[in-house]
Amino acid sequence: SQTIHQWPATLVQPVGSPLSLECTVEGTSNPNLYWYRQAAGRGLQLLFYSVGIGQISSEVPQNLSASRPQDRQFILSSKKLLLSDSGFYLCAWSPWTQYFGPGTRLLVL
Amino acid sequence: AQTVTQSQPEMSVQEAETVTLSCTYDTSESDYYLFWYKQPPSRQMILVIRQEAYKQQNATENRFSVNFQKAAKSFSLKISDSQLGDAAMYFCAYRGGVQGAQKLVFGQGTRLTINP
């Protein structure tokens, strides 16, 4: 069966520091991959998606970037975090239905 | 662009009772998919149920069922015999039927409280 992992689970970072969140999927090949952000009590905002290795599409202009160095690996990065980057980050994969990872809580201070 | 609207920010129900969460959407596509996701306090998004637009029969999953009205662009979720574990945020989502990115459009969510 397929599983999706995200790490770290929780992260507290100072403003201006770099960021790297990782997402990996097991048990499938060539999935579509997605990064979402959710502010407290709000809906999900799609940040990036990828339909293949090296193929990244950005939905929202910001200081975040994404990469897909391997088929089942999706990385969310930032060179310098802002306070507004705080939130809950969810990774998802899909064949036809999107399945979500456990998420990463990011607090930027 | 497609939009999804959940008009009930909060709902509450007595344990063992039935509750219906509302969702409407706007699209010009004829082929699409609709989903309900549950987000408990752990915040992981869990798929509850899905509906293919080309299917006339409403989807059911145990105590969860939908009322899909394609002409009215309505997709409500009914939870029967509510249990304390059903307490969560519920999100309605839309996905177009065209292959490719298969992006989801989410509503703003409904917070469901179960009263013992």
Image (tube, coloured by chain):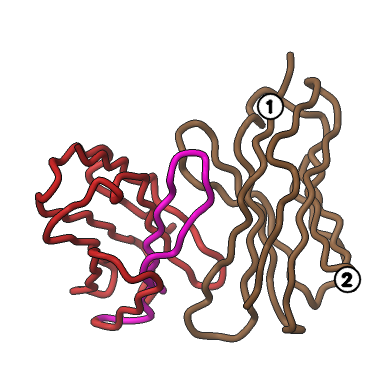
Q: In which quarter of the image is the C terminus of chain B?
A: top right
Q: Where is residue B93 in the image (x, y as percent from the top left)?
A: 63, 61
- Mark 1 chain: B
Tell me the SS state at disc 2: loop
Which residue is depicted at the point 64% across and 44% down?
B90
Residue A106 shown in magenta:
no
- Mark 2 chain: B
The secondary structure making up most of the magenta span is strand
Instruction: Name the residue nearer the viewer: B106 or A84.
Output: A84
Tell me the SS state at disc 1: strand
Left or right: where does residue A72 sit relative to residue B70? Answer: left
Q: Position of residue A47 (x, y in %)?
A: 38, 65
Instruction: Name the residue nearer the viewer: A31 or B7.
Output: B7
Q: Color used for chain B? A: brown
**Which numbered disc covers residue B56?**
2
State the extent of the magenta-drawn residues as a range.
A32-53
Left or right: where does residue A36 sit relative to residue B81? Answer: left
